[in-house]
Image (tube, helix red, strand yellow):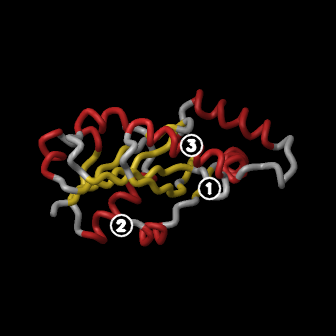
Amino acid sequence: MSTMVIYATKRGSSELYAKTFAQKNKYQIIKQEQASSEELAKADEVYYFGSVYAGKVLGLEELKKKLTGNNRLTILSVGLTAVEDQEKLAEIREGVSKVFPQASFYHLRGRLIKQQLNMPEKIILKMISKSSKKKSLQEKMEIEKAIEQAVDEGSVDCIDLSELEKIG
């Protein structure tokens, strides 16, 4: 049985998780843009690590075009959403299941470095942070706290490589 790890990332969190997972398990790894339909057809099992932007997992539509449907698929979303943020997590999971209803799903927390963002992204984060600061601590979702930290301190890092032990 052959297993392949694929990742799609803008700023590196998904890549770090994917490379760590692939190395630990001795799986072949490839960036999503470089994966061909032919390569994917040879894999019995595919693990897809994709960064979350605006509640959607990066690159799922492109992956769907390349997969044959004969692969066992596990989607691992990577973003600032915490397990406690059930509503946000359900939104991500729903987006995944619309594209890949048969896929297994896991969510991992990533990191955000303000310096890596472009101006529109910085403006959006600042707006979210400003809105979030009006809420009491109990009202805030974990993702809002993380965004506030990124805006105020320049970065937030929620990466936990030990979470990879739960996969597979």
Residue 136's place in the image compared with 128, above or below, is below
Residue 25's place in the image compared with 55, above or below, is below
Cα distance between the residues tagged 1 and 3: 22 Å
> In front: mark 2 or mark 3?
2
Query: Is 16 placed left or right of 94 in the picture?
Result: left
Query: Is 114 placed left or right of 65 in the picture?
Result: right
Numbered disc total: 3
Q: What residue type is labelled 3?
A: Gln
Q: Looking at the rendering, in which quadrant would you find the C terminus?
A: bottom left
Image coordinates of residue 140 in percent, x first then y, are 78, 49
Q: Which amino acid does label 2 sit on?
A: Gly
Residue that badge 1 annotates: 82
Cα distance between the residues tagged 2 and 3: 34 Å
Q: Which mark is residue 58?
A: none
Image coordinates of residue 120 in percent, x first then y, are 59, 27
Query: Is 79 placed left or right of 1 in the picture?
Result: right
Q: What residue type is labelled 1?
A: Ala
> Is the C-beta separation of discs 2 and 3 under 8 Å?
no
Q: Which mark is residue 168?
A: 2
> In front: mark 1 or mark 3?
1
Secondary structure under tag 3 reads helix
> Is the C-beta separation of discs 1 and 3 under 8 Å?
no
Q: Which mark is residue 115?
A: 3
Secondary structure under tag 2 reads loop
